[in-house]
Each structure stands twice: as structure tokens, then as C-alpha cells.
Image (spheres, rainbow, N blue to C red):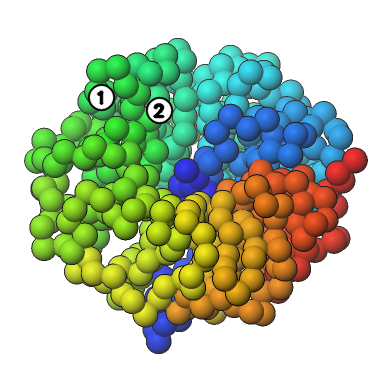
Amino acid sequence: MKPNLKNIVIIPFLLLSFFVVSQAGNTDFSFSSNIVDRFGNSDGISNNQGALMLLLPDGKIILAGSFSKYNGKNCSKIIRLNSDGSIDNSFNAGVTVSNSQRIQSLRLQSDGKILVGGDFTTYGGQSLSAIVRLHSDGSIDNSFQFSVPESNCHVKSIRLDASNNIYIGTFSGPLGFGTGKVYKLTSSGALDPNFEITYLPFTVSSSNWVNVIELQSDGKILVGGTYGLLKRLNTNGSLDLTFNTASLSYEVLSIVPLSNGKVVVGGLTLLRRLNADGTFDNTYAQSGTQFYGGDVRNMTLLSNGQILASGTSSLGNGLWKINSDGTIDTSIQLEESGIAYTTILSQFIQPDGKILLSGGFSTNKFRVSFGIERFNSNGKIDTTFNINNGLNQSGVVNDLDIFQNGDILIAGEFSSYNQIPQKSVSKLKANGQLDNSFNISVA
């Protein structure tokens, strides 16, 4: 999801096996209620480009982004598919946002309603700025009372807490010179009157995008984004001045709050652990600012305190299991890829402990495959995953999710899978073969 940004999920760990704990309200082994925002300025499925993807508990699929057609049918930036890939005509989205605007984030609530964020100023003919909530049938939920008051606003981050309060991270102002904020809304979409709206400090002549919002167990809010943005807000929204964040020069893409109050931060050439007061924890082995020649885009916390991390590496690896002291657990390493650059945009740990990775990469010296690969828990290629060559050579899988039966949904920017024409969304069987019953026309 992105960059995906996926929520941190605790995975019980035993004998190198991983078991997924599903989120509340989600019946499959997926991270499907997470925000997906990895598609930039893509033109959408109608041009072999990507879309945002949200797999619903009933197996249906929400696609959104900036596309205007699906299977040759005109649609306006959001659509729901049946599990076989056909259009679900009961999803009454209508005309949503204008051609020049995009949907940039999705979030599924436990009641089945869908939060939609982006850079739009109208939605469905109504004046609604940057965020809207839909009923499960796609119609606008007019009980949702909030619209971002600033102009030129983007909503790329949406987070829910256990009480169904909604946190949104915004960027407003012209690109290249703007600022970020975090709003807290009640479940009705009204501004929480007890939550202070704080302008996040930003560097002059730069833009502070909010990439990720994470909640600590004490209710405080961690916010990460561009240009080293990492702040903590108190439960009332005010800036936590006790969190003296050491200078970060790189973009923050992922955050793991730990039970002892410390925080692990991943980003562009960045993997650091911070003390509870925000200072660098110099006892953590990864205490430098450069991390293995790469970027940490995804982190999954394991119940034994280790972290499974993945991202971009100029060393041709891109997957690491990190011990609680910051050292690298060498029991898991990707088999040599034979290439100089790897970009992993999404990671997923299956219930059987196998690891699905997707992104823009090719693997490995034993077989050449593009965009998606599955590994055993020790990092060795899973030879039962029959993807052959995978995507077209320049193809990218930006996000993946898994159905209850183990089938895999992928979305990104690709035009073929195993040399069979595709249009940016495909369904794979659990063994990696293309599911030809998934009805996406390429005409």
C-alpha cells in the first residue's frame, strides 16, 4: 500500500513462522483497511496505470485513483468490483471528482463505510474539500460533517482509533511551499472541539506532506512525513514539547511505536530508534543516518520484538529482519538478486510464515521474475509459487492483498503477467498462477 503506507500489525512469531492477526472488522488475512497511496500522478487503469486498492471483507474490491475508464466503461476515479473482476453496478458512485483531481487515500471503517481522501474540491457534484465518507453502496454519507477548510489541500493519511475517531493528515498550500496539519474528527465527522489543530513545523521553501500517522498506547499521536518531519502530538492535539526529536534530514515513511515508549522510524536511508523523549537511542545498532544503502518503506512488528522491514536497496537485497537491539538477523536474507537495485513497495506475511514482496524489482539468479515474488521465512525463494516471469519487465506492483482462500490481488503499473495482457489489476491463485476467471478486459 503506499509510498504505502500500511499499519503496524503484531505478528506472533514461533520457529521462524509468522501468523497474521486480522484487524477488527476484517475477516481475511490482510491489511486491507490500510491507506494505499503509492501511485503518484498515474493516469489510471485506462492507460495501463495503477489505482488505489481496498479489498473488502466480502471479497469485493474498491479501486480509486485518477483513472477514467475500467474495462472500457467510463467511470470517475472510483469503482467497486465483484470478486471476479466484473463491475459491481450496485456501487452507486456516479460522477465523483473532476478530471484534474485525484483520490489519494482510502480507509474502511468497521461499519462498512469508506473514507476517501485526495486533492479534490468537489465530489459527486457537492462542494467537499479533500475528504468524503461514502455509504457501503457508494453514495455520499451526508451525516459526515467535515470538509477541509484550506485551499490546495491534499489528504494522504487517514487513521482510525479504537473508538472510531478519525485522524487525517493534510497538506495545504502550493506545492514547494506549504504545511501539514492533523485534524481529529468524531465518528460523525465533526471536528473534535477538544483537539487543537496544530500547524506542523516546516522548512522554508519546502512542503511538509504527512505520510504516516501512528497512535501510541497512551493516546499520543506520532506524525511522520517529508523533510524529516517527525512530531508527537498530545491527546489534545497540541505539540508535545517533551518529544525533542533529533534532527532528521530524510523523509519518514514508516513508524513503529514500541510498548516501552520508544519509537522505531524508517524512511529514506533511515532506520533509527528514538527514546521516549524523541532523542536518538544510541544503544540501537542502526544508529547512523544511512541504512544499508536503501530506504525502509515497510515495517512489521513481530511479537518477539523483532521487526521485519523492507524497502529500497542499492545492494540488491531490500528485506531485513531486525533484532530488538538493532542488529540484523542474518537468518533471513533474500537470495541474491543479480541486480544492483531493488525497490520493495509492499510486504505481506502469510499465515504460513511465507513472505510476499511486491514492487519494482527482478529476482533472482535462479529465475528471472518481475514485480512480485514469494519467499520462505528464511528468505529463500518459494519454488511452489509459479509466477514464471511475472510482470512485463518495466512493470511495478504497488500493492497486494490476499483473499480468505489464499488468492492474491495485485495492483500497480503493468501491462502483462506471464506475457498475458493485463491492465494494472490482476488476481493470482495462491500458487502464483494467473486467475483467468478474474474478468478484466484489455480491449
Q: Which residue is pictured at 47% across the width and 29% down the height?
A: 155
Which mark is in front, 2 or 1? 1
Q: Which comes before the other along the chain, label 2 or label 1?
A: 2
Q: Which residue is mark 2?
A: 170
Crowd class of label 2 (few under 14; some 14 to 19; many from 20; radius 10 Å):
many
Query: In the displayed structure, does residue 270 sit left or right of residue 317?
Result: left
Which mark identifies residue 202?
A: 1
Crowd class of label 1 (few under 14; some 14 to 19; many from 20; radius 10 Å):
some
Compute the Cα span from label 2 to label 1. 13 Å
What secondary structure is marked by label 1?
loop
Query: In the displayed structure, does residue 63 sit left or right of residue 421?
Result: left
- Is residue 66 or residue 10 the one in the foreground? 66
Look at the picture and state if 95 lies above or below 381.
above
State whether residue 66 appears in this view.
yes
Residue 180, given in percent of the width and then of the height, sits at 33, 26
Look at the picture and state if 27 lies above or below 139.
below
Query: In the displayed structure, does residue 370 sit left or right of residue 181?
Result: right
What secondary structure is marked by label 2?
strand
Residue 126, given in percent of the width and then of the height, sits at 63, 16
- Name which residue type carries label 2: Thr
Query: Which residue reaches farthest bottom?
Result: 15
Q: Which residue is pictured at 66% across the width and 48% down the height?
A: 395
Q: Which residue is pictured at 18% across the width and 32% down the height?
A: 239
- The C terminus lies in quadrant: top right
